[in-house]
Image (cartoon, rainbow, N blue to C red):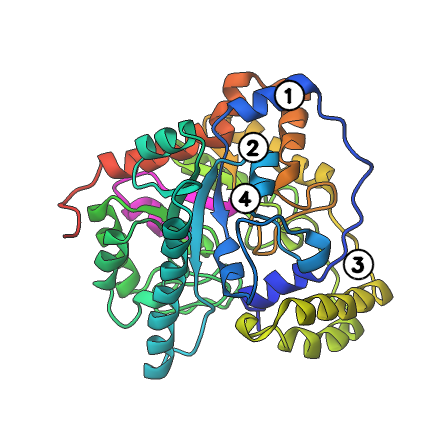
Amino acid sequence: MPPLKRSVLLALALTSFQAQADEQVSPATQALHQRLLVLDSHLDTPMNFLRPGWDMLVRHTYKDDGSQVDLPRMREGGLDGGFWVIYTPPGPRTEAGRAYASHYGLSVLARIKDLISRAPDQFELALTPADARRIASAGKRVVFISMENADPLGSDPALLQTYYRQGLRMLGLVHFSTNEMADSATALPEWHGLSPKGRDLVVAANRAGILLDVSHASDAVFDQVLALSTAPVIASHSSAKAISPHPRNLDDERLRRLAAKGGVVQVNSYGDYLIPFKPNPQRQKALAPLYARYHDLAALNPVEVKALQGEIAAVKQRYPQPRPDLDVFMQHLLHILAVVGPEHVGIGADWDGGGGVAGLEDVSLLPRISERLLRAGYSEQDLANIWGENLLRVLQAAQDRRDGPAPL
């Protein structure tokens, strides 16, 4: 079975990447990067809010606790914010499973809203592209809210209205496992695309002006959402199948169709999608009991987290696998740019959810991407589009093309 997002998160957290030799980022590039509106479309950082003693306002290190985003590192890397994810682990499609998902999704939403409430001078909820620009201009971090895996809506799709009122502006239907709404790219097809409930949810999202996200969806779901949606759609964290043939990646033909409808693909830095990995049964057997201890983040204190990191790092050193680096990430980014152009590409690195490569371990290093893009011949306006303007444009299009009243 595909791993749960928590296991993926913590696998990353316990991997000791060896960074490449420090890349030189020129002072001019640093200044440009800090001037730009830099947004990431897929921040899984709200999962860290569950950790006892973990504080978003304090600088952490990837080495110590596996985290990749906090306020000090956002400032250092020029990250103005983005979409903060309500991720719910896929669970059983039973009455109890639906109840758990409903409660879990609302609890993560509450933690995101709590961050905004306790640090109003640092973070602010954004509902529109204009909000994002205003918030960033004021020196605060932009908090859009998205949902990855629509399981919290499984018991009652009308809950979409509740989430909308609380700030939800992007919706991804599915994750690693097929659910009641749609087939996953990494599971056997059940619905051969969208389920009837999934089709209804696409229509409801359009009516509300909620941006639809096709990352993690099967190719059939991608095709059906693109055909059914009255607004452009986004792939919030996906990479290029032409570079690595993972089922989560998008082929060139679908990239072109996404762009032709006005959509945007946000390039991911999740290692398993960037390069192929060969199964290693010994490694998997050694890691399985260690990962199992991480299924409930809220039960582990910082000392326990650090100790467990050491144990898993030792296993990974004993059974090494190739590690993708910044060069590989840039291959995906530059390929997608060549296919659809800089008006349809952004960054959705999957920070704190499995993303990050050697040489790009956390958000403090984002200027390295800007340096690489400039060297590749992209202009300041291209970088502005890639780092945030394309994302805001597709969100604005979803809101402009709302075909019914917003939920009350």
Where in the figure is residue 92, as x and y percent of width and height?
A: 42, 79
What is the three-letter code of the residue carrying label 1? Thr
Disc 4 crowd, CA 10 A, few/some/many (<14, 14-19, 20+):
many
Position of 181 relative to 234 (above/below) = below
**Disc 4 to disc 3, C-alpha distance:** 32 Å
Which stretch did the figure color magenta? 222-238
Q: Nearer the viewer, residue 281 or 394?
A: 394
Q: Nearer the viewer, residue 278 or 145?
A: 145
Closer mark to the observer between disc 1 and disc 2: 2
Where disc 4 sits, the SS reads helix
Return the disc, 2 or 3, that comes first in the chain's sequence.
2
The answer to whether residue 147 of the structure is visible from this angle is: no
Disc 3 crowd, CA 10 A, few/some/many (<14, 14-19, 20+):
few
Where disc 3 sits, the SS reads loop
Q: Mark 3 sits on what residue?
A: 321
Q: Are marks 2 and 4 in contact (CB under 8 Å)?
A: no
Closer mark to the observer between disc 4 and disc 3: 4
What is the three-letter code of the residue carrying label 2? Gly
Return the disc, 3 or 1, that comes first in the chain's sequence.
1
Please identify the quadrant where the N terminus is shown: bottom right
Residue 11 picture quarter: bottom right
**Disc 1 to disc 2, C-alpha distance:** 11 Å
Disc 1 crowd, CA 10 A, few/some/many (<14, 14-19, 20+):
some
